[in-house]
Every structure is written in C-alpha cells, then in structure tokens.
C-alpha cells in the first residue's frame, strides 16, 4: 500500500488561508506592534486545575502571569497523555496563536511534544519534568523542573521525629526518576534523624486513581506506617485518608494542611509562579529562553508549607538548620557510598550528589531502607 | 515496632477490608442494572449516572452540610437519568445500547461541567458503624468500620431477590423481560415497566456514586470512578442477572482489587501491575469456566438485546 503524505485538513487550511490573508492585508500584521510584546501562552494540564496537587500548583503559577502586560493565557485541563494532547497543542497554536506552550504532564513529552515541535518549529515548547538533551531533541523544546526532592528530604526530617513505629509510608504513582528521587529523599531525611527507620512504598501505577490511592494508604497504615506522604497528582485522597486513620501527613505539590488539620507536619510545594514569570520576561525582552531550566529551594522553585502543630521543638530546630544549608546551595541529599535496597552502591564513595547532579535525573533505584521495587 | 505491624496476616485482612470498602459502588450499580436488565433493557449509561451521582451528592452535601441530603439528591438525579434513557428507548427502532453510551458521555460531561467548583471544598462524610471494637488491633477496627450504605446494599440485595421471586411487581418485571407479547396479553404496558425499572436502576447507581464521593475515597474529582460503573454493568452478566450473584461478584471484585496494594505493603513488590489486573483476570477466568458452547446464557432475560 502506498503511503500518502499526511497533511491534516486543519494544517492545510491554516497554511493556505494564512498566506492569502497575509497577502491581502499587508498593513494589518504590523499594526499591532505597539505596547508590550503581545504573547499568547498555552497551559495544558492532565487533571483538574484545583486538585490540591500537581495541576493546581501549575495553574497557580500560570495565574501569576495574568498581571504581566501583553500576556494572553489559554488553558485546557483534563487532557490525557495520548494523541489528545497533540490536538490540544495544535489548536492552541493554530486557533489561539500561542507562541509558548507549557504541556505540564510528564507523559506529554515523548512522543507528543516532540512531534508537535517538529511540526511547528516557530512555537516554543517547555515541558515540565522531561529530560531534554541537546543532541536528541529539537531546539524549540526544553524542559524545566525543580529539585523538589529537597522538600521531601525536609518532609522526612519531620517524619523521622514524628514516627513512633519507625516505619513511614509513601504512596507513589509510577517508578520514574522524579518519583524515585522523592521516595529516596523522604527516607534519607527520616534516617538523618534515626537510621533505623524504614519506608514502605506502594506504587498505584497511575497519576490519579482515587480508590487505589485510598487502598494503598490504608494498606500502609495497616502495616504500621504512621507518617504518610505521596507523589500522585492529587494528594487530597491520601491526605484525608491518612489523617482520618490517625497517621501524620507530609504534603506534596501544594499545601494540604486544610485537609489533614493537626496531623499535617509540613509539605513540599511548588512555586511555579517565579519560574513562569522568568520565562515570560525573557521572551518579551526578545531573548531566547532556556532549554534546560532547573532550580530548588535556593532558586525559589520549591517552598515548604509552614510547620504544623505536631512538629516538636527538636524537629523544628533540625528542619530549620537543614533548610538554611539548602538555601545556601551546598547540601547533598544523596551522599557518597549510598547503597540501593538490593545492596549495590549507587553513589560512588567520596562523591556527593548535590541537587544539580545530572545523574539524579536518571535515577532507577530505591535506596537501602526503602521497602519496595521499581518494577 | 513489630507490635503494630501485622505482617502476612495483613493480606487476608486487607482483602476482607477491601471487599467491604471497595465493593459498595459495585453492589449498587449492579443491583440497579439487574432491575433494568430484568425488564428487558440494557442501560450502559450507568457509568455516567454513577459519576453524576458522585458529583451531585458531593455538591449538595457541601452546600447543605448534610451527607444524607447529598445521597437523596444523587438518587433523584440518577432517577432522572434513568427516566430519560427509558423515555428515549420507548420509541421504535431506538437501540438501547447506543442510547446508553450517549447517556454515559452526557452524564460524565455534565458532571465535570457542574462539578468544577466542588473539587476543592470538603464535604461531610457519611456515617459508619464501628463493628470492630471487640478487637484490640487497630487494623481490624479500621477494617470493620462499616459504612451504613454497605449495610443498606446487603439488605437491598436480599430484598430485591425476594421481590423478584415472590411479589407481583417482580412477576411483572420478569414477564416484561422475558416476553413483551405475554406482557401485553396480560394488559401490561412493557414500555412503562421498563421506564420505571430504568429509573430505579439509575437511582441505585447514583447511590453508588454518592458512596464514592461521600465515604470512600470520600472526595470529588473527575477521575473518581475510573470505569467502575462500566465494570459493574459487566458484573451483572457475570452474576447471571441474580441479585445475590451481584453481591458475590462485587465482593469478589472489591477484595481482588485490594490485593495489589496489600501485597506491596507486605513486601511482595515485584510485578504489581499484574496484581492490579487480578480482578479482571479473575472475572475472565470465571466467565470462561462457566461458559458453555452448547447452551445459552442461563438466567438471561429473553427480551434483552444482548442475548437476542
């Protein structure tokens, strides 16, 4: 069977009509070039914008852009990590004239963002969490992420002081590097308080599965875990279920203290507003925006929830001291000689991985003391 | 630390607890669908009704601060969905399966649209009865904290089974389901019976939704159901249109669903994706084992478009 070159109807109409329009009205296109550079930005979320979690954190960051002059925001939520997201990106570019797209969910990157970037070389794509490399990926794509495992390490410190059973629990979605970093950092933080602590992890296999997350939380508590945190898109169910069973909760993505009340210790939150504002200011100034943007506590990418009532004075002291070192920028969560839970040395002796270490972005192990497996 | 951990005993306990916690929506949806299908019509739209029920229950509970008013609102909304399905299917040459799929999408879309402002607020939860106080183990106490709706579901199962077998209403329902001609000869209008049966089925399915949003997991968002309504419709066939079979199938499905997290929590961590498939594999195995190449599905209503 011969393969016809595939041109979508929308693409065909767009190119022919745009050409005709530009030819017919030469004065129209240049007339809007006064005031601040107009810029349409598209945000795509995998879930609802107000989920107390990942999407809410991004939507709050996007909302911070509304005050910038010349910026038009287009948003779409509940876009699955399938070819649907390609359609959304195409319509944002073609119909809304978006010049910069933020497809925020992990699974959008490969192949969807990459495919659209090849098709629309004039648009810029910045993806949250993906690992962009200069050799492999188009130049109009980039990735940004925050070193939120620093926040999970701080979570772990409060958990280490709060746990009486010396067993803490983690409800995780999928075993990808960002999630594994968080699980490992949470345990390492707790072990910095008491080296006998273990962390049980349960993978649900999906970013958002309310019933399974509740079941996983219950299963962890049934096995004796008394501090629970998570890395799923919406920590609402985990926070409510754990607090309801009397376990302490460390938050993630956004502040869940309203859901867990006195059981809320602290939480690792995103501060995307700073990150997005930087991107837009750079773009409006006519400069190229970064392809590989990273930052942690120090850079204002990540912040911590205010400490809860249940956090002891000792825990507060250590938490604040560690946070101060991290803000100074020289704190390595993953220290030399670290072993995974199968006994292999994963961080070479004498070599500490600070948050910038590129090795961390391809993490595929759980450290010693984490009960669980990545496959 | 060992005194608080159950070790391997946690697995059967988790399966039991999961069977009780997770099965309730399945029980209500499959009972509702049994009523509808026994009248000779299939309503595939119950996934939409379930999600809309979850949304309306949560919204009304947030606004009135009463979980029971939420359940009532869900029942009314579910009945309206059922009535709409039943009304459209009354017309000649309308396919009930196609209408069901349309109603499912309609229910999902409407629930997402109207439910936007209710994702963040926290609604009051439905009450539950602590039946585990005899045990000193907190795990057992937690497993036996049984929601009122689960108990209602149990009672309803036996009530519907009795109703179908022993009452005039049950007889009318079965006659309509097995032969429209016989029903007409008895002076019964099959369309009216089916309309009411679909409405009742919708109301029950919506209660299942209310359980999801108001008790377990107890929050409203757009992924709350993840296909449970569709699965429950399939369970009806699995249960051979028998209410007690529905109860058994729902419990089995709930318990098997708890297997994945429970095994990971005791350290069986390899291959969790396979364990998560356990309920579906189990359903397949039982369906294959009970199928027969020579006889038709036993218990199937004759008028059902699925079996015609």
Image: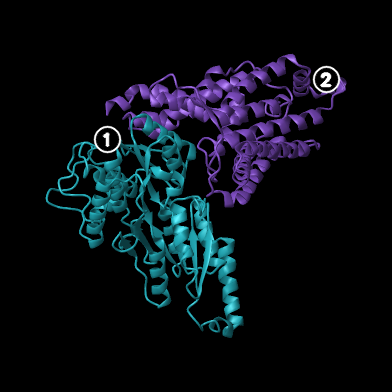
Measured as percent of width and height from the top left, residue B275 is found at 41, 30
Task: Give the left or right position of residue B288, taking residue B134 as reference.
Answer: right
Query: Which residue is painted at 51% across and 23% down in the image?
Result: B252
Label 1 and label 2: CA atoms lie apart by 69 Å
- Residue identifier under label 1: A166
Please name whichever residue, A141 or B38, is drawn nearer the observer in this view of the structure.
B38
Q: Give the percent coordinates (x, y) of residue A84.
A: 52, 53
User: For the residue carrying disc 2, how many other residues have a C-alpha within 10 Å: few (<14), some (14-19), or many (20+)?
Assistant: some
Q: Is residue B175 left or right of residue B141?
A: right
Report helix, strand or loop for mark 2. Answer: helix
Q: Residue at x 32, y 27 (%)?
A: B4
Q: Determine whether A181 is above or below A341 in the image.
A: below
Residue at the disc numbered 2: B182
User: Quick one: label 1, few (<14), some, or many (20+) residues within 10 Å?
Assistant: many
Q: What color is chain B drawn in?
A: purple
Q: Which mark is residue A105?
A: none
Q: Please identify which colour was used for chain A in the image.
A: cyan
Point out the residue furthest to the top here: B166
Q: Where does residue B234 sit, x and y in percent of width and height? A: 59, 29
Secondary structure beneath dot 1 equals loop
Residue in the picture at 46% in, 50% down? A52
Give the quadrant of the C terminus of chain B: top right
Residue reaching furthest to the left: A350
For the N terminus of chain B, give its image quadrant. Answer: top left
Kindly tell me whether residue B240 is visible in this rendering: no
Nearest to viewer (mark 1 / mark 2): 1
């Amino acid at each position: 069977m011969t393969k016809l070159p595939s041109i979508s109807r929308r693409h065909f109409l767009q190119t022919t009509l745009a050409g005709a329009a530009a030819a017919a009205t030469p004065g129209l296109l240049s007339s809007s070039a006064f005031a601040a550079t107009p810029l349409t930005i598209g945000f795509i979320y995998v879930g609802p914008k107000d989920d107390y979690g990942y999407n809410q954190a991004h939507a709050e960051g996007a909302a911070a852009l509304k005050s910038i002059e010349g910026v038009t925001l287009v948003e779409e939520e509940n876009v699955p990590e399938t070819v649907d997201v390609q359609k959304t990106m195409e319509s944002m570019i073609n119909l809304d004239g978006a010049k910069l797209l933020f497809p925020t969910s992990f699974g959008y990157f490969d192949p969807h963002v990459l495919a659209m970037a090849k098709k629309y070389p004039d648009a810029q794509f910045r993806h949250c969490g993906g690992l962009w490399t200069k050799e492999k990926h188009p130049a109009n794509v980039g990735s940004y992420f925050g070193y939120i495992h620093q926040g999970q390490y701080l979570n772990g410190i409060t958990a280490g002081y709060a746990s009486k059973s010396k067993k803490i629990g983690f409800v995780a979605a999928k075993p990808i590097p960002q999630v594994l970093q968080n699980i490992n950092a949470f345990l390492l933080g707790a072990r910095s308080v008491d080296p006998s602590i273990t962390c049980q992890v349960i993978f649900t296999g999906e970013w958002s599965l309310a019933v399974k997350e509740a079941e996983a939380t219950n299963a962890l508590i049934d096995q004796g875990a008394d501090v629970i945190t998570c890395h799923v898109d919406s920590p609402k169910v985990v926070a409510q279920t754990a607090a309801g069973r009397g376990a302490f909760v460390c938050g993630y993505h956004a502040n869940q203290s309203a859901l867990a009340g006195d059981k809320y210790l602290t939480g690792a939150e995103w501060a995307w507003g700073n990150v997005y504002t930087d991107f837009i200011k750079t773009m409006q100034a006519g400069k190229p925006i970064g392809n590989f943007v990273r930052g942690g506590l120090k850079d204002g990418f990540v912040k911590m929830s205010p400490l809860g009532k249940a956090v002891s004075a000792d825990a507060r002291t250590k938490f604040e001291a560690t946070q101060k070192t991290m803000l100074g920028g020289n704190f390595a969560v993953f220290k030399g000689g670290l072993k995974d839970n199968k006994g292999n040395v994963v961080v070479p002796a004498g070599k500490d991985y600070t948050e910038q270490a590129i090795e961390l972005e391809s993490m595929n192990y759980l450290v010693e003391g984490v009960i669980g497996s990545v496959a | 630390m060992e005194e608080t951990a159950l070790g391997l005993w946690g697995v059967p306990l988790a399966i039991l607890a999961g069977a009780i916690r997770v099965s309730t929506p399945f029980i209500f949806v499959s009972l509702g669908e049994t009523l509808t299908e026994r009248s000779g019509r299939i309503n595939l739209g119950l996934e939409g009704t379930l999600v809309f029920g979850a949304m309306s229950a949560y919204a009304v509970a947030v606004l009135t601060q009463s979980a029971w008013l939420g359940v009532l609102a869900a029942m009314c909304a579910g009945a309206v969905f059922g009535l709409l399905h039943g009304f459209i299917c009354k017309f000649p040459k309308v396919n009930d399966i196609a209408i069901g799929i349309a109603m499912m999408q309609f229910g999902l879309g409407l629930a997402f649209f109207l439910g936007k402002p209710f994702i963040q607020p926290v609604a009051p939860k439905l009450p539950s009865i602590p039946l585990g106080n005899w045990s000193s183990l907190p795990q057992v106490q937690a497993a036996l904290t049984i929601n009122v709706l689960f108990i209602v579901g149990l009672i309803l199962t036996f009530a519907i089974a009795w109703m179908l077998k022993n009452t005039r209403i049950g007889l009318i329902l079965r006659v309509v389901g097995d032969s429209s001609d016989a029903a007409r000869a008895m002076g019964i209008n099959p369309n009216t019976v089916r309309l009411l049966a679909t409405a009742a089925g919708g109301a029950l399915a919506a209660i299942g939704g209310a359980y999801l949003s108001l008790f377990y997991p107890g929050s409203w968002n757009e992924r709350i159901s993840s296909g449970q309504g569709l699965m429950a419709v399939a369970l009806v066939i699995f249960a051979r249109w028998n209410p007690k079979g529905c109860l058994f199938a729902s419990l089995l499905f709930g318990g098997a669903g708890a297997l994945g997290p429970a095994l990971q929590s005791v350290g069986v961590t390899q291959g969790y994706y396979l364990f998560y498939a356990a309920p579906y594999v189990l359903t397949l195995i039982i369906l294959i084992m009970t199928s027969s190449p020579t006889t038709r599905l036993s218990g199937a209503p004759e008028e059902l478009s699925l079996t015609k």
